[in-house]
Amino acid sequence: MGVFKDYAYYYDLLYQDKDYQAEADYITELIKKNKPDAKTVLELGCGTGKHAVLLAEKDFNIYGVDISQDMVVQAQERLKERQDLASKLAFCEGDVRNVKLDKKFDVIISLFHVISYQITNQDLQAMFQVAKEHLNEGGIFIFDCWYGPAVLSFKPDVRVKRFEDGKSLIIRIAEPKIYPNDNLVDVNYQMLVIDKLSEAVKEFKETHKMRYLFKPELELFFEKNNFKLIDTQEWLSAKVPGFDTWGVCFICKKV
C-alpha cells in the first residue's frame, strides 16, 4: 500500500472543508512579521496547489514541489485556470528530502504536516538540509507538525467521515495504530468510493505513517542546520502550544 496514490485523486474532495483562505492569510501574516521583504516562496509538499494559488494572489512568487505526480498534475491544471497568476506560480514533482532546484528563496513553507511524514531522523535531516540549501541568508522556514504532547495526551482514535460532491460519495474510515517507542502513528485509511452516475463501488486502502514531534528534538535539527527558532505557536490561533495542541507551527530563521 502506497501513500497518496488513489488518495491523491480524491484529495480535494476529502479536504473540501479545509479553510485554505484562512491558512493562507495566517501564513502571510507570519511572513510579514518575520520576513517583511520576502518575495519568493518555496512550498515543500504543495499538494494540489491551493495554498500556492492563494499566496500568489498576495503577490508572492511561489514554487511548489510535491512527491505525488498526480497532485502536481492537479496543481498544474489549477494553474491553467488562473493564467493571471502564471508568472507567479510553478510546480514540479520532487521529494522534499532530496529535491535540487538550483535557486534560492526568501521563505520556505511546508504545510499540513508534511514534516510529520518524515518518519526517521535521516528523513528529517534530509528535509532540513533541503530547506537550508534553498533559503537565502536570513530567510525563514515555516512548517507545522503533529505535536507530541497532544498526541500522547489525546491519543488518536478511529474516525469515520463521509464526503460527497456531484460525482462521488466517499466513506472514509481512519484507524490509527500508535507506536510510542518510535514516536509514530500508522493511520490506516479504508475508503469506499461510490460513483453517483454508474453506482459502481471502489474500495482502496492506504497507510499514512506519521511522526509526532517535540520541540526539544526539533531544536537539535535547527542547530545542526544553522536555523534559529523564532516562534512556536498553535496552528492558526497563535496560542502557546499545550497538551491539547495537535497542530503546532514552527518558524525558524537561517543564520
Image (spheres, helix red, strand yellow):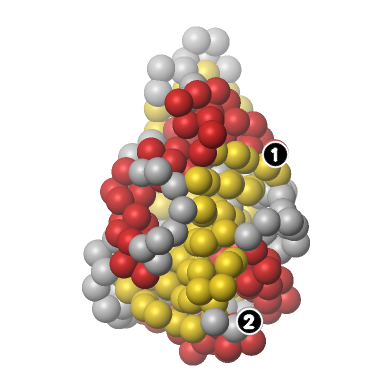
Q: Which mark is residue 69?
A: 1
Q: Earlier in the sequence, mark 2 or mark 1?
A: 1
Question: Badge 1: how crowded within 10 Å, few (<14), some, or many (20+)?
Answer: some
**Residue 123, placed above or below residue 216:** above
Q: Nearer the viewer, residue 54 or 73?
A: 54
Residue located 31% across and 67% down the image: 33
Q: Secondary structure at mark 1?
A: helix
Is residue 193 shown to the viewer in this render? no
Q: Amino acid at mark 1?
A: Gln
Tell me the quarter of the picture where residue 101 sits.
bottom right
Image coordinates for residue 134, horizontal then vertical, percent: 64, 64
Left or right: 34, with 224 as reference point:
left
**Residue 150, placed above or below residue 9:** below
Q: Kindly identify which residue carries mark 2.
A: 225
Image coordinates for residue 131, horizontal then vertical, percent: 62, 67
Left or right: 196, with 243 as reference point:
right
